[in-house]
Image: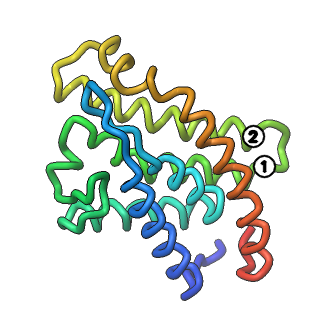
Amino acid sequence: MKKSKISIQDICAIAIMAAVTAAMAQISIPMPLGVPMTMQTFAVTLTGIILGKKRGAISMLVYLLLGAVGIPVFAGLSGGLPKLIGPTGGFLISFPIMAFLIGWGMELRHKKGMFTLMLVLGTISNYVVGVIMYCILMKASVITGFTACVLPFIPTAIIKAVLAAVLGLQIHKRLAKSLNWV
């Protein structure tokens, strides 16, 4: 079994993408039913593409831990455990899963359609976890959760995924050579 080591370059890349996610979270548009439209999912998608499944998931765990201890990295310069266990916390909690799935798609990108499939599954995982937590905490129906948390975001989710894929693939290609990443 091959032993996996994390290099200083990996640690730096993980930290940079956690910081990029924190910065992108500040680009936020309040929405009527309480779920803001942010650029966080763009950053999470970018993270998975650039860093791959393992480093991408670790980066998002770092991001969540920073926010959980109160560092204002979430939307609206907020932080703290209540954000993770509140009605929109499921969207945040899903970030490591989302980055992992999209990063896994990077490993499978040479198989026809697998990158796109994993990109879509990563995005869907964000919505599923987010809607479930929203519905439980708000005592809302799945229809209400879907209407508040998914429907208004579909057009921008597609745009963000496409832009992150185009940009991320270019960045990954350049970094992969110099850092010996797959």
The image quadrant where one finds the N terminus is bottom right
Would you call the spot at circle 2 few (<14 residues within 10 Å), some (14-19), or many (20 or more)?
some
> x, y (%) of residue 165?
69, 49
Name the residue carrying label 2. 114
> x, y (%) of residue 181?
72, 73
- Is any atom of residue 58 visible in this view? no
Q: Is residue 73 left or right of residue 163?
A: left
Up-down relation of residue 118 to residue 25 (above or below): above
The image quadrant where one finds the C terminus is bottom right
Q: Is residue 89 left or right of residue 161?
A: left
Number of marks in picture: 2
**Residue occupying the point 19% across, 67% down:** 69
Up-down relation of residue 120 to residue 17 (above or below): above
Name the residue carrying label 1. 109
The answer to whether the residues at label 1 and label 2 have Cβ atoms under 8 Å apart is: yes
The kind of secondary structure element at disc 2 is helix
**Residue occupying the point 34% across, 47% down:** 93
- The amino acid pointed to by label 1 is Arg
Q: Quadrant of residue 9?
A: bottom right
Q: Which mark is residue 156?
A: none
Q: Using the image as rendered, state which of residue 102 and residue 174 is in the foreground.
A: 174
Q: Quadrant of residue 116?
A: top right
> x, y (%) of residue 178?
76, 82
